[in-house]
């Protein structure tokens, strides 16, 4: 099929949405389809349109259905779609109605949708190739905790650094933060954290391959989001056998499971600090987290995501 893939995020943006769009395009091409990726729909002919983001892609969604009411339309929902916009924004709500199929990235996303839309919703877990840890450990003996997030309020991005400040002097924990501030306020907060926190190292915005290497070499990933549809970084950590601490929100519980022992309450710095200290100082608990994440590795297998997309497209193929 000729497929238009609409993504508001530029391929060069180095954020979760752009990584998702690039991976999606690659999968569709592997399945034999012709894919054109655009920020907005240009009105030209195709057999199918896939739009990432119900709200930000709404104008493209609306135009496509006006011009091609009988053609299939797939809308993939982000965290801000699921946990904010579809509750309050008429455009986001209308995008759900116009879609032939909806995609969520983990099963708890389905319960956020009105009941009449759930039958046309499919769960497609994000996948990641395995990146193996380098054989030589860090010479300084630090317990590296990786944070992969541009700095914006929904991600609560400095929570891990704040928790690290509360650890005892004996701790060797170090926070490695990859991402850039998306506002002046976040830049101000970042600079203040760098100045006051010897455990915090900001690495800035990095190419995806380098981010993945640093993650694979870390002892832990910390995902502190207040709002998340799923997480590319989480899937990449699971693929590379890196255990995770995570805020207990539906978008992360949907992948890690309700019984995962590495959760902390959203925004609770002291609880996160206690959890980090326990993980660093208790090898048995660390191995428990690692074993749980290892059992989840089939969820993020690229073959699984390819199969899910193939099944979805077969539902929508002509005839």
Image: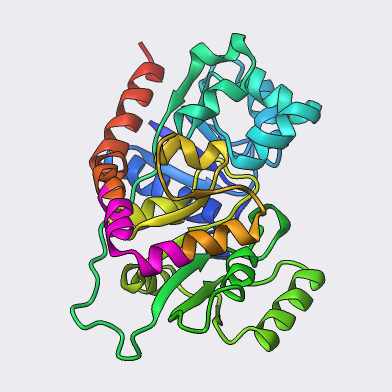
The front one of 30 and 236 is 236
- Residue 129: x and y in percent read 28, 55
Residue bounds of the magenta highlight: 277-291
Determine whether 183 is above or below 261 in the image. Answer: below
Q: Residue at x 31, y 49 (%)?
A: 293
Which quadrant does the N terminus fall into? top left
Determine whether 236 is above or below 213 in the image. Answer: above
Give the left or right position of residue 279, taking residue 118 as reference.
Answer: left
The front one of 102 and 179 is 179
Give the left or right position of residue 199, taking residue 107 as reference.
Answer: right
Asked if residue 76 can be seen in this view, the reply is yes
- Residue 308: x and y in percent read 32, 30
Q: Residue at x 52, y 84 (%)?
A: 169
Give the left or right position of residue 86, taking residue 278 as reference.
Answer: right
User: Residue 283: within the magenta?
Assistant: yes
Give the left or right position of residue 50, taking residue 83 as reference.
Answer: left
Q: Which image quarter: residue 141?
A: bottom left
Which quadrant does the C terminus fall into? top left
Spot the residue most to the left: 135
Q: Residue at x 39, y 82 (%)?
A: 142
Task: Tell me which secondary structure the magenta stretch mostly adopts.
Answer: helix
The front one of 98 and 102 is 102
- Residue 86: x and y in percent read 71, 29
User: Residue 273: within the magenta?
Assistant: no
Q: Residue at x 60, y 52 (%)?
A: 225
């Amino acid at each position: 099929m000729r497929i238009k893939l609409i993504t508001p995020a530029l391929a060069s943006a180095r954020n979760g949405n752009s990584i998702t769009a690039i991976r999606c395009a690659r999968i569709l091409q592997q399945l034999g389809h012709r894919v054109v990726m655009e920020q907005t729909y240009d009105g030209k002919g195709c057999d199918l349109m896939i739009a990432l983001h119900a709200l930000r892609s709404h104008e493209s969604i609306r135009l496509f259905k006006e011009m091609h009411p009988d053609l299939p339309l797939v809308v993939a929902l982000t965290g801000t779609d699921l946990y904010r916009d579809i509750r309050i924004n008429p455009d986001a709500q209308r995008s759900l109605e116009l879609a032939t199929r909806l995609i969520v990235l983990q099963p708890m996303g389905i319960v956020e949708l009105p009941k009449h839309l759930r039958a046309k919703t499919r769960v497609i877990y994000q996948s990641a190739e395995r990146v193996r840890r380098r054989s030589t450990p860090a010479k300084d003996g630090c317990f590296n905790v990786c944070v992969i997030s541009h700095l914006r309020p929904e991600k609560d991005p400095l929570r891990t650094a704040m928790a690290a400040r509360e650890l005892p002097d004996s701790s060797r924990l170090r926070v490695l933060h990859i991402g850039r501030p998306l506002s002046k306020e976040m830049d101000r907060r970042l600079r203040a954290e760098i100045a006051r926190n010897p455990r915090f190292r900001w690495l800035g915005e990095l190419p995806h391959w380098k981010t993945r290497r640093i993650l694979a070499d870390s002892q832990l990933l910390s995902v502190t989001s207040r709002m998340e549809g799923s997480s590319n970084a989480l899937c990449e950590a699971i693929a590379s056998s890196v255990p995770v601490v995570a805020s207990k929100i539906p978008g992360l519980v949907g992948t890690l499971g309700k019984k995962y022992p590495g959760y902390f309450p959203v925004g609770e710095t002291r609880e996160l600090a206690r959890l980090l200290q326990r993980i660093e100082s208790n090898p048995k608990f660390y191995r428990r987290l690692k074993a749980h994440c290892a059992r989840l590795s089939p969820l993020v297998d690229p073959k699984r995501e390819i199969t899910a997309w193939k099944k979805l497209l077969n539902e929508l193929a002509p005839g």
